[in-house]
Image (spheres, rainbow, N blue to C red):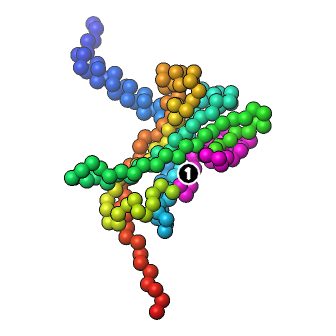
């Protein structure tokens, strides 16, 4: 006796299994987010849990730099026009220097060196005091939707690795978008001494 499934049910099962596999392919998790206001604007603190698979560890140990992009966006829905949005990107580069046997995390001209990969990943997974908004970019009392994610930017890889990244899920390293409501509070006005 053979079991024959309708084509539509078989397609749904294949898509569901593909979704489960792709959900497990994500090796970055967001564990903490805080968006704090200051006189200049709003700064973001975030913690991620980053787990590199053996292929990515091997690539980094052979001198291939990995670029991680942290993306922040703030959106306000408008009924009369397109949504109002602000986005920021922070690029972090993780590399290994065989001559000094040091791992390095860099952002722009700033860098920090580490003796082992686990220490480098621990620092890479913590974003602190990242200025994402200026006060003039948001309106007090307005409701916004904030979003954050981190991903491995495969477009920054050397060309032969980019081709490999297109055909292999081992290079697909990203967190899901974490979205939350954000309301801008009116600044407290200080009274002048009399």
Q: As rendered, which of 132 and 50 lies closer to the eye?
A: 132
Q: Is residue 120 magenta?
A: yes
The answer, for residue 155, to whether it is visible in the render is: yes
Q: As rendered, which of 56 and 190 lies closer to the eye?
A: 190
Tell me what residue is drawn at x 46 percent, y 49 percent.
Answer: 88
Rendered location of residue 155, percent (x, y): 51, 31
Q: Quadrant of residue 1?
A: top left
Looking at the image, residue 79 lies above or below residue 167: below
Looking at the image, residue 163 lies above or below residue 82: above
Tell me what residue is drawn at x 37 percent, y 29 percent.
Answer: 19
The magenta span reads: 108-130
Tell me what residue is drawn at x 49 percent, y 42 percent.
Answer: 150
Looking at the image, which residue sits at the far left? 80
Looking at the image, which residue sits at the far right? 99
Number of numbered labels in the structure image = 1
Rendered location of residue 145, percent (x, y): 35, 53
Disc 1 target residue: 127
Looking at the image, residue 37 lies above or below residue 32: below
Q: As rendered, which of 124 and 1 lies closer to the eye?
A: 124
């Amino acid at each position: 006796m053979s079991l024959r499934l309708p084509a539509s049910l078989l397609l749904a099962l294949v898509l569901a299994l593909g979704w489960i596999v792709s959900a497990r392919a994500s090796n970055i998790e967001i564990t903490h987010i805080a968006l704090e206001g200051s006189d200049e604007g709003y700064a973001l603190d975030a913690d991620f849990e980053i787990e590199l698979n053996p292929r990515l560890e091997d690539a980094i140990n052979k001198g291939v730099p990995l670029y991680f992009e942290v993306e922040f966006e703030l959106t306000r829905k408008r009924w009369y026009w397109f949504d109002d949005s602000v986005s920021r990107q922070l690029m972090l580069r993780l590399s290994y220097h065989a001559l000094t046997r040091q791992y390095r995390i860099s952002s722009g001209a700033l860098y920090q060196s580490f003796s082992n990969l686990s220490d480098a990943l621990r620092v890479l997974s913590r974003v602190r005091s990242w200025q994402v908004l200026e006060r003039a970019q948001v309106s007090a009392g307005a409701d916004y939707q904030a979003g954050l994610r981190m991903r491995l930017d495969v477009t920054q890889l050397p060309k032969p690795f980019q081709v490999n990244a297109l055909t292999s899920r081992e290079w697909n390293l990203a967190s899901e978008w974490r979205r939350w409501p954000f309301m801008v509070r009116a600044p407290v006005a200080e009274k002048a001494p009399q």
